[in-house]
Image (cartoon, grey):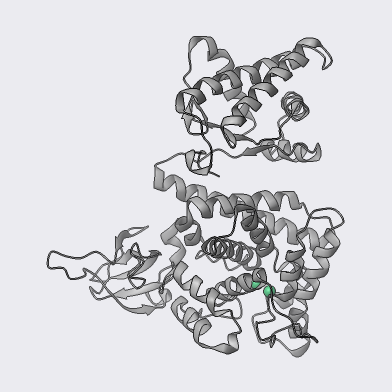
Amino acid sequence: MTQPADSSNGRSAPDGQLRQGGRTLLLAFYTALRSLKLYPLENATVQNALADLDAMTRRLLEIETELEIRMAGDFIFVNATRLRVELDNYASFSHILAMFRAFEIGALRIRPGIDKREWQVFLSLLLRLSEGAPPAEPMEELQDRLDEAKVTHLELDSPLPEGGSTELSRQAAKQVYAQGVAVTKDVIGSVRMGRTARLKRVKRAVQLVVDQVLNNETSMLGLTTIRDYDEYTFTHSMNVCIISVALGRKLGFSKVQLCDLGMTALLHDVGKARVPAEILNKAGKLDEQEWKAIQAHPWYGALTLFSMRAYEEIPYRSILVAHEHHMKIDLTGYPKVVRPRTLGIFSRIVSVADAFDAATTRRVYQTVPVEPDQVLREMWENPKRGQDKVLVKALINLVGVYPVGTCVILDTFEVAVVSGASTDRQQLNRPMVRIAMDAEGGPVPLPGTEVSLSEKDESGAFRRSIVKVTNPDRFGLTVGDYFV
Ligand SMILES: [Fe+2]
Ligand SMILES: [Fe+2]
C-alpha cells in the first residue's frame, strides 16, 4: 500500500483546490454510476455523465501527478486531503463508501492517460459484479477483469489496516509480505501443474513491495527474518525480492526499475518448481544425481520464464537472472559457461540477496543457521563466494553489521534481538534492538522493549553495547516473534 500521495512526488495542488476538485470528481463519479444503472449505455444522459467524469479527472490530473481516492473509516481522502462531507454530497459519498467497502477496496488510483472508455468499463463492472453473489475476493476479481479489459490507468488497492501509525505500517508491511508469499506459491504451483501462471498478480504484489520498501523499509526488512520452515521456497523468494529492491533503492534505481528488479528477484528460483519436492526438502546429504537435479534449476527457470513470454510480459532480464544467479562473478558456480561473460547488475544484486537470505535461514538440511554477521563477513572476505564486493558493502550498509533478526548478548547481561539498523549512520554497530530477556534471564513480554544502542547515559557512556552474537535457540527465542 502506498502512503497517500503528497507534494514530494511531483506537482501538487493546494489543499483547497484539491478539496473542491475532489468533491466534484466524486459527485461526477456517482452521477455516472447512477445513470449507467438506470439507462442503456448509448443514452445521452449516460454519455454526458461519462464525459463530465472524464473531463473532471483530466482537469485534476493537470495539477496532480496521480490521483488516489482512499477510504479510511468513514472518510474519503483525495491524495492526502480529506474531503468534507456536507448535506449536498452526503448521499453520493455514503453510496461510494458503501460500494468500495462491499468490494473490499481501500483505494482507487487514477493515472494520467485515463479516458472515457476506461471509466465506462470500471463503472459497468462495479454495477454488474454487485448484482450477483459477491465473489470470494471481490477486489482481486474486479482488478482481474479490469486487466482483461485493458484498463491500465485505474488501479485498486486494499484497505489500510486500522491502528496507530507504527502499528499501521507494521501491519501494512505484513499484509504485503503475506500477499507476496501467496502469489509466489500460486506461480510455483501453476508451473508444477503445467498451468499458465497469473503473472499480473505477481506484478501487482511486487508493486506493493516496492511501495513498502520506499515508505516503510525497516518494517519490510524486519519481515525477512520470519523464516518459515515449511514454506521455504516461497518465503525465500519474497525475502530475496525485498532485499533486492532495498539494494536497488540504495543504488538509486527508479521506481520502474525497482519493479522490474523485484519481479525478477521474486521469480529467480521459479525453476525449482521442476525439481522434485523430495529432493528440495531432503534432510540428508544429496547424492550426485540429486545434486545435479538441484543444479538444473537455473536452466529450468530460464526455460519456464521463456515459455511464459508467449502470454505475459516478462522482462528479458528476469530470464537472464534465473539463469545466472548461481554463476558467481568469477563464473565458478553453476551452470558452467563456455564463453566468458559479465554478469548483469540485476544478476549480481539478486545473487547477493539470495546468498544472504539462504545462509541465514534454517532449512531442512541446515539445522544450525549461520549468524547473520558471520554471513556478511564471509561474503565480504571470501572471494570464493563470488559476490560483487560493492554490492556486499551496500548490503552491509543496508542491514548494518548486525542485521535485523540477529540475536545478541549485551554488556548489561540482557539478551536482545536486533530490530532495526542504527539510527546513526556512523555507528553501524549500534542498531535498534528489542530486549527479549532481562539481566536476570527473565523473559520480557513480546514484542520486547525497543531501545537504541546509540543511547548514552548522563556521563556520556553508552547505556548498552553488544558483547557477542548468539544463537536464539540457546535461549528458546524465535526471532520472528519480535516482529509480529
Ligand atoms: Fe537458486
Ligand atoms: Fe534462491
The relative height of residue 35 versus residue 139 in the rendered view (above or below) is above
Q: Mark yes or no: residue 252 visible.
A: yes
The relative height of residue 159 versus residue 367 in the rendered view (above or below) is above
Q: Residue at x 80, y 63 (%)?
A: 305
Q: Mark yes or no: residue 105 visible.
A: no
Q: Residue at x 59, y 33 (%)?
A: 67
Residue 291: x, y in percent?
A: 73, 85
Count of numbered labels shown in the rendering: 0
In the picture, measured across the screen, residue 313 lies left or right of residue 387, that is right
In the picture, measured across the screen, residue 62 lies left or right of residue 399, that is right
Residue 150 image-quadrant placement: top right
Q: Residue at x 32, y 70 (%)?
A: 430
Residue 226: x, y in percent?
A: 51, 63
Residue 11: x, y in percent?
A: 53, 37
Residue 157 image-quadrant placement: top right
Quarter the C terminus occupies:
bottom left
Q: Quadrant of ligand 2?
A: bottom right
In this view, the residue farthest toward the left is 459
The relative height of residue 24 versus residue 400 in the rendered view (above or below) is above
Residue 154: x, y in percent?
A: 68, 36
The relative height of residue 166 versus residue 305 in the rendered view (above or below) is above
Q: Residue at x 52, y 43 (%)?
A: 9
In the picture, measured across the screen, residue 428 lies left or right of residue 348, that is left
Quarter the N terminus occupies:
top right
